Image (tube, rainbow, N blue to C red):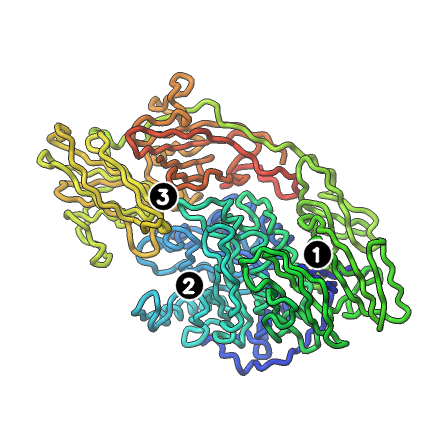
């Protein structure tokens, strides 16, 4: 049986895209294996000098000697605790043209207590790699130690690091190295400085030795079959050479930065190829992280603004500029929404379709790997507003990447373009770019029987697409060829063994276009999205996850939008007589929305301010010195109050300091990271609150607040207690940690999460809980038994978050609800014991918190706990809390029937 091997174009106007099992050809090049200097101690992975299954040269990665385009996206398994949903995300990535996934591993949530590693549940490396192997998607593992990832401490645990996780992770990954598994590379460190003079730190030393130790740890523990890589934070060439050189060097780039108005696009970087030739010309250009989203800081513009900034137009222009530079390994970052192509609730954003078209085109165009840069500039176009990069192979295949010369232009520009063909240079008339748009125009593009490949029932097929424009396509024909069209709107002319087709095209439903593989999907063929594996074209569904031909039946597996009628169209061999969808008819259901207005229970979650509160089981501050540098020694008084030194590393922290009757006021220095907050109470009476500022604040970021409170007349007793509650907003990258001045206090007690580093909650991990009262007594969990301290909204109308708290302090609200679904205040949200929301009213901007299936019980009772912390004496309330459903789908994904462990 003959199958159609893949082909798609990427916005090409002269589109001769089709499947092509092109014979590998050695391109003329000024690079050879002798030009590549291997990493010290490495067995080497360069083509011609290595027998490894994973090799590379200056053109691309090769698996089993076959070139591939590594088209990757970032995903962090530890950010999705509902393990069954890992498969859902990876299947969507693969359907979207991604053949690889890059994963960070978070050391901080793995080693909550120094020397004790926990890889259970959503921290499991082997579980994730097993799922990736089943799905058939390649993996790049990035274990740090430092990962950044906009997470606490950049993924580092609190305390002096020794990186025992590196040894264990390497042992876990080793059995999954290609060809035995999906892992094709492992990254050593991330955005790490090097020895010598650095712009960020004038004096650096020891970095080379440190990097060598990281690499040696990986190799010693079995990472010998795949390249070890590095991600530079700009293309400086760090660790591309020298004693700590890695096998394969890469860098990251975020050209549009963080959230900004859509009009504020920066220009594309036309120097990427020059950077590559300067840093590592003997290796392929590897973009280890390229902007796939936009960070939204506290007090930011919101997720919608992120999506506007880094939208499908951004993907169309900036990613094609990467291909113009010859990027053969590209990983789009990031994973935790912020305008990612797959949103946090796992729905597909509009740019998913744009990226899918690019990925499928690159996989269908293996000669792209061998194409070198011929020219750049405006000379090939009739308009000075059009910039063209011309790439060509030694065999004469051409790719022209065209864009406007400036991203500030949103006007339509029409132009003619000179292109090379075997018959000489020709001019293509009447091309156009609609503002922020880029196109890849090809000539001498081989397809069908011209490529010694299988066809559909002996016929060649091409797929043409464009955005509501008329296009011209020229095909080589013979004297006996007779063009036949299925539409009167298509005009043809024939001359000199060439037939030209003038085709008026309207943009079809490209989000509903899918190209699942149906052959070569066993063994390591499951990872191959190139023309070497056969495929079918499917039009219509919201998502097609897989396709299998069983006899005369094409079995499709995927998702349909609920409430809509989907027309299914398939291009497949004539031997296919019938099509099944998910094996049977799939019922759909209406979208569920609702408001949580059932019975609420509430209690005071800051009883610690009371003078008589029992803190006898709290930790007593006894340290008078710290291992931190001199600038971080106690700011005043005699005791060290860094919570980390007592085993409390995250979440809310509480301090209680005792003093006698002679004081008239207190000076506090409180540090809790940018955007943190605190409140202070004397003998139960409110003194005041303070907050840090975002790093992006025009006045400058603040993670330390110095304040003086004068005690009210008559408030001092013989024995007094100052209570300070701190909302810790994460450990900064540098050793700046929270402190409070102890002055003439006789003693200090402090607490955080239950049992500190010895937390018993090994399921959710060490960064999950803090020191709020309701957290410490276990009220966040569904099986908590209410005590007499909890009031009910049935008897107390004020016992509702919609009424709120009428003074400074913290109050907790708890309720339950049932679901039945076919397949200037601060707040925290817990659902079934998992913390999934954190809101700061004056900073925002997030107000919607996706709760994944498996955490949210779709078929039974759910438990919700909400805390409201008023920093003002007037109190605070939440206007409403709504249960809002994402779009509903009739899906083939695994049903999560119970809460994730």
Sequence-first disc among 1 and 2: 2
Mark nearest the camera among 2 and 3 is: 2
**Separation (CA) of disc 3 from disc 1:** 57 Å
Q: Residue furthest left?
A: 662
Q: Are marks 1 and 2 in contact (CB under 8 Å)?
A: no
Q: Residue at x 17, y 42 (%)?
A: 667
Sequence-first disc among 2 and 3: 2
Q: Which residue is mark 3?
A: 759
Mark nearest the camera among 3 and 1 is: 1
In the depicted structure, whether residue 284 falls above or below residue 161: below
Mark 2: few, some, or many residues within 10 Å (few <14, many ≥20)? some
**Separation (CA) of disc 1 from disc 2:** 39 Å
Q: Which numbered dot is residue 163?
A: none
Q: Can you tell which quarter of the image residue 828 is in?
A: top left
Q: Residue at x 85, y 67 (%)?
A: 494
Query: Which is nearer the eye, 155 or 110?
Result: 155
Q: Which numbered dot is residue 191?
A: 2
| Secondary structure state at the residue bearing disc 2 | loop
In the depicted structure, whether residue 854 falls above or below residue 190: above
- In the displayed structure, does residue 51 sit left or right of residue 716? right
In the depicted structure, whether residue 139 falls above or below residue 798: below
Mark nearest the camera among 1 and 2 is: 1
Mark 1: few, some, or many residues within 10 Å (few <14, many ≥20)? many
Q: Which residue is mark 1?
A: 466
**Residue 88 image point, x, y percent:** 60, 47
Q: Quadrant of the N terminus?
A: bottom right
Q: Can you tell which quarter of the image residue 318 is in?
A: bottom right
- In the displayed structure, does residue 628 sit left or right of residue 236? left
Q: Residue at x 39, y 52 (%)?
A: 108
């Amino acid at each position: 049986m003959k199958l159609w091997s893949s082909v798609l174009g990427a916005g090409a106007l002269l589109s001769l895209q089709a499947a092509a099992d092109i014979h590998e050809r050695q391109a003329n090049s000024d690079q050879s294996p002798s030009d590549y200097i291997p990493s010290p101690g490495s067995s080497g992975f360069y083509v011609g000098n290595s027998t490894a299954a994973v090799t590379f040269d200056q053109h691309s990665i090769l698996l089993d000697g076959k070139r591939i385009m590594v088209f990757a996206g970032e995903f962090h398994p530890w950010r999705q605790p509902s393990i069954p949903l890992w498969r859902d995300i990876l299947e969507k990535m693969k359907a979207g043209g991604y053949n690889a996934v890059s994963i960070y591993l978070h050391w901080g949530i793995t080693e909550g207590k120094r020397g004790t590693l926990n890889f259970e549940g959503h921290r499991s490396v082997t579980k994730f790699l097993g799922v990736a192997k089943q799905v058939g998607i390649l993996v790049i593992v990035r274990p740090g130690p430092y990962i950044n990832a906009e997470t606490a401490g950049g993924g580092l645990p609190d305390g002096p690091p020794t990186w025992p996780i590196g040894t264990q992770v390497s042992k876990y990954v080793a059995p999954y190295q290609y060809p035995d598994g999906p892992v094709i590379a492992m990254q050593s460190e991330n955005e790490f400085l090097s020895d010598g003079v650095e712009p960020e730190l004038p004096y650096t030393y020891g970095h080379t030795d440190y990097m060598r130790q990281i690499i040696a740890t990986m190799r010693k523990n079995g990472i010998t079959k795949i390249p070890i890589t590095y991600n530079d934070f700009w293309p400086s060439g760090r660790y591309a050479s020298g004693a700590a050189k890695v096998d394969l060097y890469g860098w990251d780039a975020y050209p549009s930065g963080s959230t900004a108005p859509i009009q504020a696009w920066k220009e594309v970087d036309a120097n990427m190829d020059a950077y590559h030739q300067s840093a590592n010309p003997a290796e392929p250009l590897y973009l280890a992280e390229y902007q796939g989203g936009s960070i939204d800081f506290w007090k930011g513009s919101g997720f919608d603004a992120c999506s506007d900034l880094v939208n499908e137009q951004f993907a169309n222009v900036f990613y094609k500029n990467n291909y113009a530079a010859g990027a053969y390994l590209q990983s789009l970052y990031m994973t935790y929404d912020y305008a990612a192509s797959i949103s946090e609730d796992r729905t597909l954003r509009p740019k998913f379709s744009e990226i899918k078209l690019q990925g499928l085109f690159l996989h269908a165009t293996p000669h792209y790997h061998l194409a070198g840069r011929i020219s750049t500039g405006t000379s090939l176009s009739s308009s000075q507003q059009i910039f063209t990069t011309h790439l060509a192979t030694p065999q004469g295949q051409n790719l022209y990447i065209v864009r406007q010369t400036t991203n500030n232009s949103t006007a339509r520009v029409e132009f003619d373009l000179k292109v090379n063909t075997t018959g000489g240079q020709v001019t293509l008339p009447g091309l156009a770019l609609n503002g922020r748009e880029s196109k890849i125009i090809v000539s001498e593009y081989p397809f069908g029987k011209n490529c010694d490949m299988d066809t559909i029932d002996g016929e060649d097929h091409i797929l043409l697409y464009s955005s509501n424009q008329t296009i011209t396509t020229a095909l080589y024909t013979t004297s006996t060829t007779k063009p036949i069209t299925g539409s009167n709107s298509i005009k043809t002319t024939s001359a000199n063994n060439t037939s030209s087709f003038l085709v008026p095209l309207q943009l079809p439903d490209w989000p509903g276009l899918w190209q699942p593989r149906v052959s070569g999907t066993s063994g390591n063929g499951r990872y191959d999205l190139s023309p070497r594996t056969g495929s079918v074209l499917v039009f219509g569904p919201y998502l097609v996850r897989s396709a299998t031909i069983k006899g005369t039946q094409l079995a499709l597996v995927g998702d349909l939008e609920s409430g809509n009628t989907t027309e299914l169209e398939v291009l497949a061999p004539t031997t296919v007589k019938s099509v099944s969808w998910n094996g049977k008819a799939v019922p759909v259901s209406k979208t569920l929305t609702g408001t949580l207005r059932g019975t609420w229970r509430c209690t005071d979650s800051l009883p610690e301010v009371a003078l008589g509160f029992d803190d006898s089981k709290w930790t007593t501050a006894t340290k008078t010195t710290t291992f931190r540098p001199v600038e971080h020694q106690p700011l005043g008084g005699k005791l060290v109050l860094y919570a980390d030194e007592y085993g409390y590393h995250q979440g809310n922290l509480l301090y209680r300091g005792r003093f006698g009757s002679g004081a008239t006021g207190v000076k506090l220095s409180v540090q809790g990271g940018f955007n943190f907050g605190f409140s202070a109470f004397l003998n139960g009476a409110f003194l005041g609150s303070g907050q840090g500022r975002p790093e992006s604040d025009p006045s400058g970021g603040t993670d330390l607040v110095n304040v003086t409170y004068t005690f009210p007349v008559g408030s001092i007793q013989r024995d007094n207690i100052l209570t300070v509650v701190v909302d810790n907003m994460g450990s900064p990258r540098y050793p700046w940690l929270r402190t409070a001045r102890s002055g003439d206090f006789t003693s200090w007690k402090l607490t955080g999460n239950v049992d500190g580093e010895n937390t018993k909650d090994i399921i959710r991990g060490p960064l999950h809980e803090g020191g709020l009262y309701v957290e410490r007594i276990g009220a966040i969990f569904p099986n908590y038994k209410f005590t007499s301290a909890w009031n009910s909204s049935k008897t107390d109308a004020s016992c509702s978050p919609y009424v709120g708290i009428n003074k400074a302090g913290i109050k907790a609200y708890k309720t339950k609800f049932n679901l039945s679904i076919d397949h200037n205040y601060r707040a925290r949200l817990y659902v079934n014991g998992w913390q999934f929301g954190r809101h700061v009213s004056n900073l925002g901007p997030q107000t919607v918190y996706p709760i994944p299936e498996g955490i949210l019980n779709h078929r039974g009772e759910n438990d919700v706990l909400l805390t409201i912390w008023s920093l003002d004496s007037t109190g605070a309330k939440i206007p409403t809390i709504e249960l809002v459903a994402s779009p509903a789908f009739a899906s083939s994904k695994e049903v999560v029937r119970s809460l994730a462990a």
